[in-house]
């Protein structure tokens, strides 16, 4: 069971404050309340559900070379549990990322010779996840990992990055939820890669902290921060959790297209059940 660190939650304004920067530097994450309204959350979630039906009907299995992870929800319906590039496919999702407040988040990354940018056309684009505990779910949890390790698996230098999450549902201990090891973003590279077995280790850690969020909240973390998505103690509806992620990048640009090949790190992600 994770620790309940009563950490401070912020509101994302038109600029990033020194307090937010200091918090990020110390812990490796920042949590903003109510980034978008519940109405916009519902619209985005409905948009995703509609496009999901089309993708399933057409038998599409990859978007820009990134595999789609299918599974079955608590109603016995086939769903997309890891849906890459939703921003390319769902208008209501794409619109959320036009918010100018998001551009300011680049300040959490060090200066870079490359433009700091939201990876809307890179990596996996905006990924929409459904975690649910059902017999035929393919995504009940995600083991410990650092997001930058995916670059390493590709044999590429690890450039600083952020992972920016927008919650489509309330999330807490009841439906699993994000657990982080605060401060591990300052680890040396060896520990960034090998502090734990990437993805396959799903065990509790006495120092892990539970992130409790509501639909519409935005939580970002440093790509070097160790984190996992815990399995819900419940089955079915109570275990269901929906969240969207996109990377904020600072390395060389590498935009993907329909012709792009599947990157190696998907072999790793494929191991998450
Ligand atoms: O669902 C989350 O909150 C985190 C997901 C995650 O860590 C990932 O997809 O890399
Ligand atoms: Fe992650």
Image (spheres, rainbow, N blue to C red):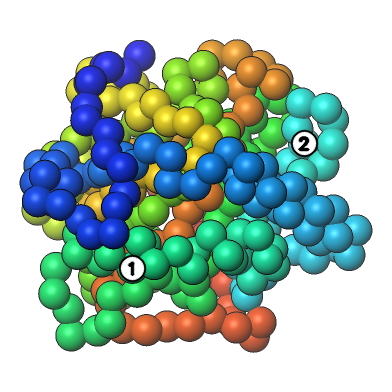
Any mark on residue 72, and which?
2
Where residue 97 appears, as percent x and y from the top left, is 49, 64
Relative vertical location of residue 8 with respect to residue 86 in this rendering, above or below: above
Q: How far apart are marks 1 and 2 (CA)?
A: 36 Å
Where residue 211 appears, as percent x and y from the top left, is 35, 29
Within-10-Å neighbours for mark 1: few <14, some 14–19, many 20+: some
Total residue callouts: 2
Relative vertical location of residue 65 with respect to residue 174 in this rendering, above or below: below
| The N terminus sits in image quarter | top left
Instruction: Mark 1 and mark 2 in contact? Answer it, CB < 8 Å.
Output: no
Where residue 255 appears, as percent x and y from the top left, is 48, 83
- State the residue at coordinates (43%, 71%): 119
Pick whichever of labels 1 and 2 is earlier in the sequence: 2
Where residue 37 appears, as percent x and y from the top left, is 53, 42
Residue on which the image places disc 1: 103
| The C terminus sits in image quarter | top right
- State the residue at coordinates (27%, 25%): 209
Relative vertical location of residue 108 with respect to residue 10 in this rendering, above or below: below
Instruction: Work out whether residue 70 or residue 129 is closer to the camera in this orientation and state it.
Output: 129
């Amino acid at each position: 069971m994770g620790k309940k660190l009563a950490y401070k939650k912020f509101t994302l304004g038109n600029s990033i404050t020194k307090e937010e920067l200091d918090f990020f530097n110390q812990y490796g994450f920042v949590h903003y309340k109510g980034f978008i309204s519940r109405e916009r959350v519902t619209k985005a979630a409905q948009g995703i559900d509609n496009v999901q039906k089309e993708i399933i009907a057409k038998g599409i299995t990859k978007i820009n070379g990134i595999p789609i992870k299918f599974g079955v929800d608590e109603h016995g319906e086939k769903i997309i549990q890891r849906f890459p590039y939703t921003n390319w496919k769902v208008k209501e999702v794409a619109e959320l990322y036009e918010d100018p407040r998001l551009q300011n988040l680049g300040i959490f990354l060090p200066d870079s010779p490359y433009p700091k940018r939201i990876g809307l056309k890179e990596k996996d684009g905006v990924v929409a996840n459904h975690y649910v505990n059902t017999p035929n779910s393919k995504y009940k949890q995600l083991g410990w990992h650092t997001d930058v390790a995916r670059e390493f698996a590709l044999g590429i230098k690890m450039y600083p990055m952020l992972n920016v999450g927008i919650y489509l549902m309330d999330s807490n201990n009841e439906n699993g939820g994000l657990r982080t090891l605060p401060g591990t973003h300052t680890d040396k590279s060896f520990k960034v890669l090998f502090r734990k077995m990437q993805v396959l280790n799903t065990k509790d850690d006495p120092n892990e902290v539970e992130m409790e969020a509501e639909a519409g909240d935005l939580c970002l973390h440093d790509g070097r921060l160790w984190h996992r998505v815990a399995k819900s103690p419940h089955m079915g509806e109570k275990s269901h959790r929906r969240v969207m992620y996109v990377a904020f990048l600072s390395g060389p640009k590498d935009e993907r297209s329909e012709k792009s090949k599947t990157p190696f790190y998907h072999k790793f992600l494929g191991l998450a059940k």
